[in-house]
């Protein structure tokens, strides 16, 4: 395995064993490559050709590389508002790969078999679910949004039993770390302060090293996590992304997007949109995501309370004050990004009204979210919607506002802020259906296009246009 250039250094295992369990392999019968992300492999310092030849064994959970970690992480999570003891129920942390630049990334196998946290599940995953995470996570990377990434999908040659019999597969997920708000909830649940201190110090060292010697470092740590989440949520909203399952175990301390189960992107702009089959009350609807992020961060503050206040009450007073700042930080990021989507260098009060007026017109007229901003970027007014009185009035105000800006900079800002294509629900489902039948051509074509979503000169028109899937639902894929 040395040929592949594994370079593991597994710092997570320096934490108390309360935070993980060593697990044995659950080898699969007949592994086969489905897709390998060669660019990511090279970034990690791995040899893609060697991976193709030998990597299917470690990336299928059938063999451990030298110095691998082989653990399942422990954590809790508020799932749709209710606390649950969770942990990696179908995942194995292969190790922490040190890149040629000295950066550290978790390599985790999803669908690798049962663990102590499987709760009577089989620990496996379906081919479609793993290809979906591969495609959407890499699309998010192409959009410039912090995200876990996908190195490979390997088929297992085994059936997976869900509502029907599915083909099995294993995804190799790459993350800055898998530390979650839920990990801190697990530490707090132990009621052993040393566990919480160990975890907080580890998270600071790994993701916020500038705070290691800071005064009041645990509260500063809390504030920095909030800032990253505020920026992340504004980016989600700007591209019409709906996570679908924003439980506390799916909020990372690093600020990366994680877990691409029941997620999707808006077609028609409707703020109340829910695509997740399990979100029956709309808790994680598109428009509610910032509010739910604040709710999750309140749970994070609750878990950290023994470290940030003399009493729980005083700690939560600080948390409440910080959450007010989170709301302000999100608003700043939201308007900054949306200002750039409209070509503006700065955003004032009147500009905010302009942004909201456009969104209201889009909602009222059920316009396509992504294509509307592309049309604005290209000054394409041919569609009927743009001839309507409300839009025409808005357009005149917007064009008047742009007279204060440099035209070349306006075009650059808009093209860099408004993706020409996104992973459309229609095209994602088509690609996954064909891949399930053994034809990866469309999947690979779509993935290639999504690597450069802001390239207005490069793309085929077909991925911009689509058939709307009425009543579209996505599923966890567990």
Image (spheres, rainbow, N blue to C red):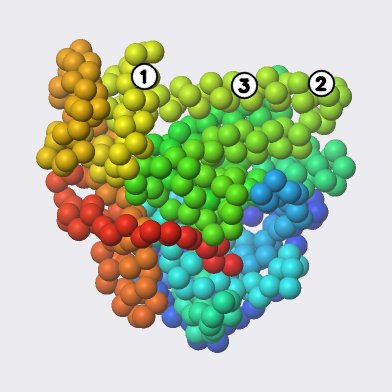
Residue 324: image tag = 3
- N-terminal of the two: label 1 or label 2? 2
* Left or right of 233 in this view: 478: right
* Along the line of sight, the residue nearer the viewer: 97 or 28: 28
Q: Is residue 188 left or right of residue 43?
A: right
Is residue 101 among the parts visible in the rendering?
no
Which residue appears at 54% of the width and 59% of the height? 277
Indicate the secondary structure of the residue bearing disc 3: helix
Q: Residue at x 71, y 28 (%)?
A: 218
Residue 185 appears in the figure: yes
Residue 219 lies in quadrant: top right
Q: How many marks overall?
A: 3
Q: Residues within 10 Å of mark 3 (few under 14, many from 20)?
A: few
**Of pointers 1 and 3, the one earlier in the residue sequence:** 3
Disc 1: which residue:
353
Q: Nearer the viewer, residue 165 or 55?
A: 165
* Residue 85: % across, % down: 76, 55
Give the vertical position of 122 relative to 372 (above or below): below
Viewer-proximal residue, 8 or 38?
38
Residue, x 68% and y 51% (percent of image)? 79
- The residue mark sitting in front, 3 or 2, is 3
In this picture, residue 451 sits left or right of residue 219: left
Q: Which circle marks residue 385 in the picture?
A: none
Kindly identify which residue carries mark 2: 314
Foreground: 386 or 477?
386
Please provide percent x and percent y for residue 247: 63, 48
Of pointers 3 and 2, the one earlier in the residue sequence: 2
């Amino acid at each position: 395995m040395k040929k592949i250039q594994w370079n593991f250094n597994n710092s997570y295992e320096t934490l108390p064993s309360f935070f993980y369990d060593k697990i044995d392999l659950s080898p699969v019968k007949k592994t086969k490559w489905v897709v390998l992300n060669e660019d990511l492999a090279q970034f990690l310092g791995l040899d893609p050709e060697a991976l193709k030849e030998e990597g299917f064994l470690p990336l299928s959970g059938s063999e451990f590389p030298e110095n691998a970690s082989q653990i399942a992480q422990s954590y809790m999570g508020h799932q749709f508002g209710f606390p649950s003891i969770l942990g990696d129920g179908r995942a194995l942390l292969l190790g922490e790969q040190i890149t040629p630049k000295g950066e550290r990334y978790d390599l985790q196998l999803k669908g690798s078999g049962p663990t102590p946290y499987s709760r009577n599940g089989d620990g496996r995953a379906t081919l479609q679910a793993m290809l979906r995470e591969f495609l959407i996570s890499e699309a998010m990377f192409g959009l410039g949004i912090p995200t876990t990434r996908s190195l490979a999908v390997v088929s297992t040659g085994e059936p997976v039993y869900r509502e029907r019999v599915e083909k099995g597969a294993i995804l190799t997920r790459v993350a800055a770390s898998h530390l979650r708000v839920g990990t801190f909830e697990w530490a707090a649940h132990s009621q052993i302060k040393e566990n919480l201190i160990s975890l907080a110090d580890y998270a600071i060292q790994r993701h916020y090293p500038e705070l290691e010697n800071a005064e009041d470092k645990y509260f500063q740590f809390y504030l920095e996590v909030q800032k990253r989440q505020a920026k992340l949520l504004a980016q989600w909203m700007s591209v019409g992304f709906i996570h679908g399952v924003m439980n506390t175990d799916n909020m990372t301390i690093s600020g990366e997007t994680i877990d691409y189960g029941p997620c999707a992107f808006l077609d028609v702009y409707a703020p109340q949109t829910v695509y997740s089959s399990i979100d029956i009350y709309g808790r994680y609807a598109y428009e509610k995501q910032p509010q739910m992020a604040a709710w999750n961060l309140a749970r994070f503050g609750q878990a950290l309370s023994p470290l940030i206040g003399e009493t729980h009450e005083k700690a939560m007073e600080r948390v409440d004050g910080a959450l007010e700042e989170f709301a302000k930080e999100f608003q700043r990021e939201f308007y900054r990004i949306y200002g750039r989507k409209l070509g503006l260098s700065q955003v004032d009060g009147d500009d905010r009204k302009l942004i909201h007026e456009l969104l209201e017109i889009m909602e009222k007229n059920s316009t396509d979210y992504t294509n509307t901003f592309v049309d604005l970027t290209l000054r394409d007014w041919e569609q009927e919607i743009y001839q309507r009185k409300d839009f025409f009035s808005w357009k005149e105000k917007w064009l008047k506002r742009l007279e204060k800006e440099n035209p070349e900079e306006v075009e650059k800002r808009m093209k860099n802020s408004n993706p020409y294509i996104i992973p459309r629900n229609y095209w994602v489902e088509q690609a996954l259906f064909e891949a399930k039948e053994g034809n990866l051509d469309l999947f690979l074509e779509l993935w290639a296009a999504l690597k450069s979503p802001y390239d207005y000169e490069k793309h085929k028109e077909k991925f911009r246009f689509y058939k709307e899937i009425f009543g579209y639902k996505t599923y966890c894929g567990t």
